[in-house]
Image (tube, rainbow, N blue to C red):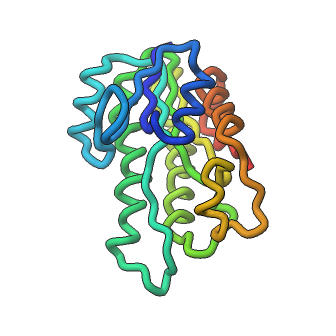
Amino acid sequence: MKILLVGAKGTIGRAVQHALSRHQILSAGRDSGELHADMTQPDSIRALFERTGKVDAIICAAGLLHLGPLTEMSPEQFRIGLDNKLMGQANLALIGQHFLNAGGSITLTSGMGNEIPIRHGSNACAVNAAIEGFVRGAAVELTAGLRINAVCPNVLQESWEPLQSYFPGFEPVPAARVALAYQRSVEGVETGQVFKVW
């Protein structure tokens, strides 16, 4: 398979590359990877797909959120997650669907914060819930044979130290385990699913 992996240089992205190493991986990021694109800019995404041509799978393991107390959060800070993680991934799916080969798939990334709220995580909660809603809705409208899923990871072991104060009592998961859910989405047959890795 020819797979476009956005966010390939991140912790999850590196683990996904390893899990899917038998495939042709085109790594992309805003400032890293072999291809560059800004997910918040539709024209940048179109230019990315014009360079890649048709692909068999699109994976997004990228997206910024704002963590901070609701009582101090500005609308501008709240928009960080909306513009980047939510609309960035939606942009990638909306444009990318037209560059998928028959039987192709799209895999987006949400996060467990929408089901298990954390302190200072209202932006993450809203954005992750919206991504999962988009996936479920899009699955019934995609061209026949195309698939879309989301992976919903817990906090990663590799990111635990700087984030543990947000996740008291949580058990972090290794990125390699999270990567298996992306493999399931790409190489499997399911659509409209949220694969939870908690």
195 sits to left or right of 17: right
Q: Nearer the viewer, residue 168 or 127?
A: 168
Provide residue 144's location: percent of width, then percent of height. 50, 23
Q: How many marks?
A: 0
Q: Residue at x 65, y 56 (%)?
A: 160
Q: Residue at x 65, y 50 (%)?
A: 156
Relative to 45, say whether 90 is above or below.
below
Q: Residue reaching furthest bottom?
A: 71
Quadrant of the rendered image containing residue 49:
top left
Provide residue 183's location: percent of width, then percent of height. 63, 27
Quadrant of the rendered image containing residue 177:
top right
Relative to 164, say whether 192 is above or below.
above
Provide residue 38's location: percent of width, then percent of height. 29, 43
89 sits to left or right of 190: left
16 sits to left or right of 68: right
Quadrant of the rendered image containing residue 116:
bottom right
Q: Residue at x 57, y 44 (%)?
A: 136
Provide residue 115's location: percent of width, then percent of height. 67, 62
Q: Residue at x 43, y 26 (%)?
A: 4
Relative to 91, say whether 27 is above or below.
above
